Image (cartoon, rainbow, N blue to C red):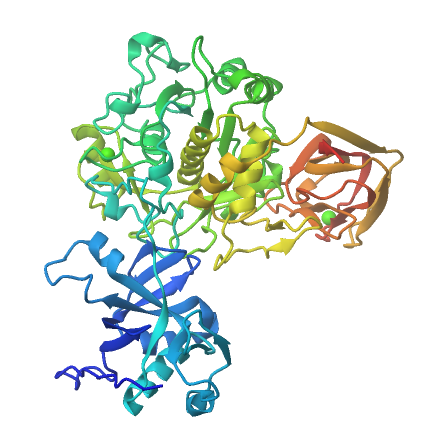
């Protein structure tokens, strides 16, 4: 067979670039001219690459814009996993010189794989030996062969070699994104969308992809339980119910039906609401994760509030409406010393909401996991976020690190973005409107660049939970039949772990859930959750089993680990495990408390040096670390006092309770 000559086009400015940037390939005989984007790099699976300023979601990863040559950069960052990185080309036939918009660029984008498609006579593969191929396989095109290399950059080197040799007719096997014809591919036109790095423009992001083509939160209602909700805000009002409908409530001072903030400092709820459901596609401001969801304001924490009000706030579902989601960016003190218990009335409110609202499917509660890590607080000591009726949300910063304040704990289920304290590792969202709010923001955040009505300085697990609330709204639009436990499991099953760096390691449990006390199942992956939601078969009815221990056990002051075997014969597929215990100890913050499942998976609450209070009485911790595991087998309770200060204690009661489905 005749070998076609392939012409090589070298840029005349070759002195600038070490390698050629325009190539003429042969796509199975069809000449194809492409340009190598020397300054772009494809990174699969949302991988965080340091020192990259911008990235754009594309296919199953992101295209990163670099300041240096992609080839050099990739080689320098090889340790990250060479197969996750690939060169980016543009098809010149699809990239008109007039095309400037990102959408057109994306359509012309071709990402290199580790394979070349080469026209070769049978038995002539030997001639490619200098390119160090890994393997050859037959092509669907007669007379052509697929040649694999170590990675996409090795394939690029091979392509350069073939070009230099001349006489070869070949093309890289490209990866490209095909468009789904039936979808809208909505692109936000909101003014500060590009600043909202958590949505798309950072290497780590919520993996929205085409989420807004599938769902926007329409007909889904979210209660923002906070210090207020500015329902008249220019970028929230279209999603907020009007005052006269009686769907908002105010438990603090002022009109009991109006959740609007009354003081400048009550801007927390308005900022949380913007992350969840700022109006999208309205040429204004920012965009929430659920840009068309309905907002109900439940004003509770602008002052002190009675426990029964907190209970009612959590169970909030006014007549003739469904409360799908309850977003809670608050909780017990994170001082690392408080017990972290919430009142029975609060607990009853969240339980009622989860069991009865939404016609028995349950309001889904997203709750911040707490900001007390600097105080050595541990989310395991937070009866609110760790409640089995809730989804505890931890915070990740812009680089995929556990936010410095974000607490680890056995109840942390999922993570979203909270950032840190300084630009640009802080978040854009809505702020209360008006000059007073703007002035107070300038006073607090000298580096703020946000105009009035918006902030670029929001952070905390307070910022993270509202993103999960928005994600839940999208999931429930896709599949309104999901129960609150189903939503939790889907979020956990689909989360991203890659590249996250936290205090605690990810560990695979006996049911192949990979979990960490820092991040739970990892960083929320909105588009993956939306894929799974409509295909999901709801979990069966909730059942429980419990094993109570009798007798007492000393916890010596010398660090000895006190361990007790707990044989369990009941066979459940576990979702939550609750450990309830009583300990006599004059300085309870000395104690490490944990339990280990038959598979070896550990749930642990770290000691809290700030906690010099005495005793735990009938204290409950709730773990998600055993999600999917079987309850049957021998569990182990472990206690240790690691602070040799002459103060020791005694366990006087302990009970393990398993909640899940019959197995
Ligand atoms: Ca907007
Ligand atoms: Ca806490
Ligand atoms: Ca001690």
Quadrant of the image containing the C terminus:
top right
Total marks drawn?
0
Q: Who's the residue at 42% across and 85% down the image? A: 121
**Above-or-below relation of 83 to 288:** below
**Above-or-below relation of 190 to 373:** above
Residue 86: x, y in percent? 37, 69
Q: Who's the residue at 24% across and 21% down the image? A: 232
**Above-or-below relation of 36 to 597:** below
Left or right, residue 318 beside residue 191: right
Is any part of residue 334 visible from this angle? Answer: no
Residue 260: x, y in percent? 30, 19
Q: Who's the residue at 37% across and 41% down the image? A: 211
Q: Residue furthest right?
A: 551
Is any part of residue 512 visible from this angle? Answer: yes
Q: Residue furthest front?
A: 1
Answer with the quarter of the image where residue 220 lies.
top left
**Above-or-below relation of 29 to 123:** above
Q: Residue furthest left?
A: 98
Please state which of residues 163 and 636 is positioned toward the viewer in this rendering.
163
Residue 149: x, y in percent? 46, 78
Residue 230: x, y in percent? 28, 23
Q: Who's the residue at 35% across and 65% down the image? A: 42
Please state which of residues 391 and 642 is positioned toward the viewer in this rendering.
391
Quadrant of the image containing the N terminus:
bottom left
Please state which of residues 17 and 607 is positioned toward the viewer in this rendering.
17
């Amino acid at each position: 067979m005749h070998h076609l000559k392939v012409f090589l086009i070298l840029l005349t400015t070759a002195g600038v670039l070490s390698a050629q940037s325009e190539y003429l390939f042969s796509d199975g005989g069809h000449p194809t001219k492409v340009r190598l984007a020397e300054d772009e790099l494809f990174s699969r699976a949302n991988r965080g690459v340091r020192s990259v300023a911008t990235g754009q979601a594309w296919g199953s990863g992101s295209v990163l814009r670099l300041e240096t040559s992609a080839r050099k950069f990739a080689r320098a960052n090889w340790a990250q996993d060479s197969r996750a990185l690939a060169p980016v080309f543009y098809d010149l036939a699809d990239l008109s010189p007039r095309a400037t918009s990102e959408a057109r660029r994306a359509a012309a984008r071709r990402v290199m794989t580790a394979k070349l498609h080469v026209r070769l006579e049978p038995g002539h593969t030997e001639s490619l030996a200098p390119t160090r191929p890994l393997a050859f396989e037959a092509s669907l095109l007669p007379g052509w062969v697929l040649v694999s290399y170590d990675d996409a950059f090795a394939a690029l080197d091979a392509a350069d070699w073939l070009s230099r040799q001349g006489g070869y007719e070949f093309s890289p096997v490209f990866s490209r994104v095909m468009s789904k014809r039936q979808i809208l591919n909505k692109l936000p036109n909101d003014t500060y969308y590009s600043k909202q790095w958590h949505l798309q423009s950072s290497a780590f992001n919520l993996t929205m992809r085409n989420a807004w083509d599938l769902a926007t939160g329409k007909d889904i209602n979210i209660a923002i339980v906070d210090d207020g909700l500015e329902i008249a805000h220019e970028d929230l009002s279209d999603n907020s119910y009007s005052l006269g409908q009686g769907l908002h409530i105010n438990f603090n001072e002022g009109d009991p039906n109006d959740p609007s903030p009354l003081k400048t400092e009550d801007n927390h709820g308005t900022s949380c609401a913007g992350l969840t459901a700022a109006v999208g596609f309205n040429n204004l401001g920012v965009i929430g994760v659920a840009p068309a969801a309905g907002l109900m304001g439940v004003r509770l924490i602008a002052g002190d509030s009675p426990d029964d009000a907190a209970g009612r706030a959590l169970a909030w579902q006014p007549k003739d409406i469904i409360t799908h989601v309850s977003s809670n960016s608050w909780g017990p003190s994170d001082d690392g010393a408080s017990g972290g218990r919430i009142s029975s009335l609060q607990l009853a409110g969240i339980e009622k909401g989860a069991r009865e609202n939404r016609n028995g499917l349950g309001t889904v509660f997203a709750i911040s996991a707490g900001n007390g890590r600097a105080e050595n607080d541990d989310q395991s000591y937070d009866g609110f976020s760790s409640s089995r009726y809730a989804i505890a949300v931890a915070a990740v910063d812009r680089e995929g690190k556990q936010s410095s304040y974000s607490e680890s704990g056995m109840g942390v289920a999922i993570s979203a973005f909270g950032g840190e304290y300084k630009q640009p590792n802080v978040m854009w969202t809505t702020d209360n409107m008006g000059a007073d709010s703007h002035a107070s923001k300038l006073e607090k955040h000298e580096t703020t660049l946000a105009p009035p009505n918006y902030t670029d300085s929001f952070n905390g697990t307070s910022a993270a939970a509202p993103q999960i609330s928005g994600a839940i709204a999208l999931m429930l639009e896709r599949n309104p039949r999901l129960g609150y436990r189903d939503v939790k499991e889907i979020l956990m099953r689909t989360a991203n772990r890659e590249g996250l760096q936290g205090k605690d390691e990810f560990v695979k449990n006996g049911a192949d859930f990979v979990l960490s006390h820092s991040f739970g199942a990892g960083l929320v992956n909105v588009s993956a959750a939306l894929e799974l939601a409509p295909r999901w078969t709801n979990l069966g009815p909730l059942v429980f089993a419990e094993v109570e221990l009798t007798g007492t056990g000393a916890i010596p002051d010398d660090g000895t680990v006190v361990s007790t075997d707990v044989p369990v014969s009941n066979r459940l597929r576990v979702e939550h495990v609750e450990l309830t215990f009583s300990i006599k100890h004059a300085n309870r913050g000395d104690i490490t408390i944990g339990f280990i499942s038959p598979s070896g998976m550990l749930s642990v609450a770290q000691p809290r040096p700030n906690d010099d209070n005495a005793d735990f009485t009938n204290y409950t911790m709730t773990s998600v670390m055993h999600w999917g595991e079987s309850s049957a087998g021998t569990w182990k309770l472990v206690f240790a006092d690691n602070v040799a200060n002459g103060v020791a204690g005694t366990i006087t009661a302990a009970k393990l309770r398993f909640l899940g489905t019959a197995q």
